[in-house]
Amino acid sequence: MKREIFNLYVESISSRFDVPKDDIFTKTKRREIVDARHVLYYMCSERPMKISYIQMYMKESGYDIAHSSIIHGIRQVKLLVDSDKDYHRMISEIEETIKN
């Protein structure tokens, strides 16, 4: 069940950030990909999904990521959501696409 939710988030975030889904699971440091990846971690953690599940799904998709790196990404997005109304709105819009 959580895997399906993870996949829905990947679809929605890839569309919102205008990046190919597969790029989210590559080792690139391009800012738009990193931002999309961090939002994915954040959205999953807010679901709530355990960090270990996020880590497992990322690895299954070809991206091996450390537990601490996921936590860092979640914190980065939390800071943006708390300080930037546009970012907060974007997160809400992504969440709405998953509910429908």
Image: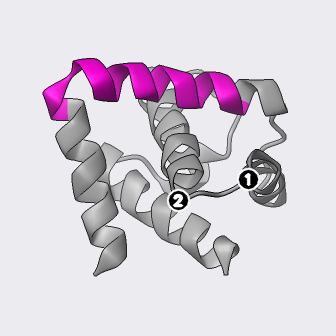
Q: Position of residue 66 (x, y in %)?
A: 84, 31
Residue at 83% x, 60% y: name it: 60
Q: Amino acid at mark 1?
A: Lys
Q: Which residue is mark 2?
A: 47
Determine crowd level at label 1: few under 14, some 14-19, many 20+ residues with C-alpha closer than 10 A.
few
Placement of 54 over or under 97, stated as above or below: above
In the rendered image, which quarter is residue 64 located in? Answer: top right
Q: Secondary structure at mark 1?
A: loop
Give the left or right position of residue 59, taking residue 85 as reference. right
Determine crowd level at label 2: few under 14, some 14-19, many 20+ residues with C-alpha closer than 10 A.
few
Q: Amino acid at mark 2?
A: Arg
Span colored in magenta = 70-86
Give the left or right position of residue 78, taking residue 61 as reference. left
Residue at 25% x, 52% y: name it: 92
Give the left or right position of residue 19, taking residue 30 as reference. left
Question: What secondary structure do most residues of the magenta stretch adopt?
Answer: helix
Residue at 76% x, 59% y: name it: 57
Q: Position of residue 97 (x, y in %)?
A: 28, 69
Circle number at residue 31 = none
Q: Which residue is mark 1?
A: 50
Q: Secondary structure at mark 2?
A: loop
